[in-house]
């Protein structure tokens, strides 16, 4: 039997054949080089028309959670614009091809989220390519571990905040004039916002900021009929982890601290984004939806 996201499964043994392995990739890392491969839902996600006719901009859409979300959105009927770094072109083109197979419009828009002009132009380019915009997924992120605060350079601290927080601000601000009532904004935070690792001080700080931004903006935009929510992943297998997102000696046990005893896969995140983007969540605003294998969070 072919499995999809609706198949009854034991979550403790799901993905037992995908074990994390020590490996090092230069930042930002590629899905094409990831060993073992992450499940992005290419073979498993089944759409049911929940986003038919919608138009979505997804940052970090080339790999990991963003790629899984792009595949799911496309199979649910949404056209998608993907933002990613130019170095990630190989991954982006693969995801774009999978999304186009669903019969939707796909735009690939490479650039650096640290650049405010790129971020503002990204929105304009997505609107032009898709004929409008009604879903924004701020997902692109930077994560580099450091054993001590003294090892975090000013450049790393600034780059992490510009990528994870400033870009979200620039893109969301530019998108607002294009978003009609009924639109949704979904930001990606993390379990790190609630249970920060000692090696991820700067990254965890950005994720807590994203939570606060989400909840404040949700209240501001609610009267306009625009819903703002967030998804908080736990330990998910993506290129972010072996490209210095985690210490090498922690990779082969990655995710074992969760109650399920394993890391998650990007395909397990995509349904959360679909739910928050769809009309099914019409009364959900300012929510942080935790997808973390059972790790306790507020």
Image (cartoon, helix red, strand yellow):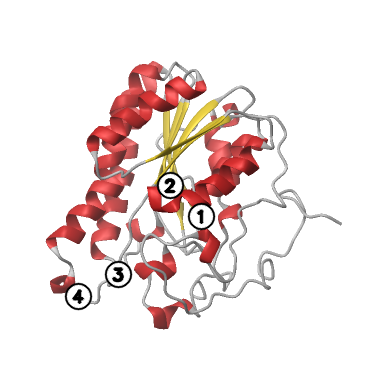
Marks 4/3: CA–CA distance: 9 Å
In the displayed structure image, the side of residue 69 where residue 212 appears, left or right: left
Quarter of the figure that contains the N terminus: bottom right
Which badge, 4 or 2, comes first in the chain's sequence?
A: 2
Q: Which residue is mark 4?
A: 148
Please tell me whether mark 4 or mark 1 is closer to you in this view.
Answer: 1
Specify whether 111 is left or right of 68.
Answer: left
- Nearest the camera: 66 or 124? 124
Q: Residue at x 44, y 20 (%)?
A: 128
Name the element at disc 3: loop
Crowd tier of the residue under label 4, counting other residues whose Cα lies within 10 Å: few below 14, some 14–19, many 20 or above? few
Where residue 12 sits: x, y (%)?
Answer: 66, 69
Res 296 visible:
yes
The Cα atoms of the two marked residues, 1 and 2, are separated by 8 Å
Front position among marks 4 and 2? 2
Residue 93 screen position, x and y as percent: 54, 45
Location of residue 149 by image quarter = bottom left
| Outermost residue to the right | 1
State how far apart marks 3 and 1 are (Cα): 18 Å
Q: Residue at x 25, y 54 (%)?
A: 160
132 vs 228: above or below: above
Q: Secondary structure at mark 1?
A: helix
Q: Tell me the residue that label 3 is attached to.
A: 145
Tell me the quadrant of the picture where the C terminus can be found. Answer: bottom left
Residue closer to the observer: 135 or 21: 21
Q: Which residue is mark 1?
A: 64
- Work out how far the residue at label 4 is from the one at label 1, CA to CA, in angstroms: 27 Å
Q: Are marks 1 and 2 in contact (CB under 8 Å)?
A: yes
Q: Which residue is mark 2?
A: 60
* Classed neighbour count for the residue bearing mark 1: other residues with Cα under 10 Å, few (<14), some (14–19), many (≥20): many
Q: Position of residue 55 (x, y in %)?
A: 53, 26
């Amino acid at each position: 039997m072919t499995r999809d996201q609706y198949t009854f499964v034991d979550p403790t043994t799901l993905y037992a054949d995908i074990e994390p392995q020590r490996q090092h990739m230069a930042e930002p890392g590629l899905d094409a080089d990831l060993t073992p491969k992450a499940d992005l839902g290419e073979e498993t996600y089944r759409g049911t028309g929940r986003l038919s006719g919608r138009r979505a901009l997804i940052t970090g859409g080339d790999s990991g959670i963003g790629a899984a979300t792009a595949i799911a959105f496309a199979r649910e009927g949404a056209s998608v614009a993907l933002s990613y770094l130019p170095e990630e072109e190989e991954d982006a083109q693969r995801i774009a091809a999978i999304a186009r197979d669903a019969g939707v419009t796909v735009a690939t828009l490479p650039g650096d989220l640290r650049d405010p002009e790129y971020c503002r132009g990204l929105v304009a380019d997505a609107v032009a390519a898709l004929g409008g915009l009604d879903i924004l997924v701020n997902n692109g992120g930077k994560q580099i571990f450091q054993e001590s605060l003294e090892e975090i350079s000013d450049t790393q601290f600034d780059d992490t905040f510009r990528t994870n927080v400033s870009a979200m601000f620039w893109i969301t601000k530019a998108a607002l004039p294009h978003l009609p009532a009924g639109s949704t904004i979904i930001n990606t935070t993390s379990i790190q916002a609630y249970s920060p690792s000692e090696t991820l001080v700067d990254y965890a700080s950005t994720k807590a900021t994203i939570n606060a931004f989400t909840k404040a903006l949700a209240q501001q935009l609610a009267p306009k009929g625009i819903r703002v929510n967030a998804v908080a992943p736990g330990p998910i297998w993506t290129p972010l982890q072996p490209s210095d997102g985690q210490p090498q000696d922690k990779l082969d046990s990655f995710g074992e601290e969760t109650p399920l005893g394993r890391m998650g896969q990007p395909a397990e995140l995509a349904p959360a984004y679909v739910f928050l983007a769809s009309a099914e969540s019409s009364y959900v605003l300012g929510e942080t939806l935790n997808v973390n294998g059972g790790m306790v969070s507020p």
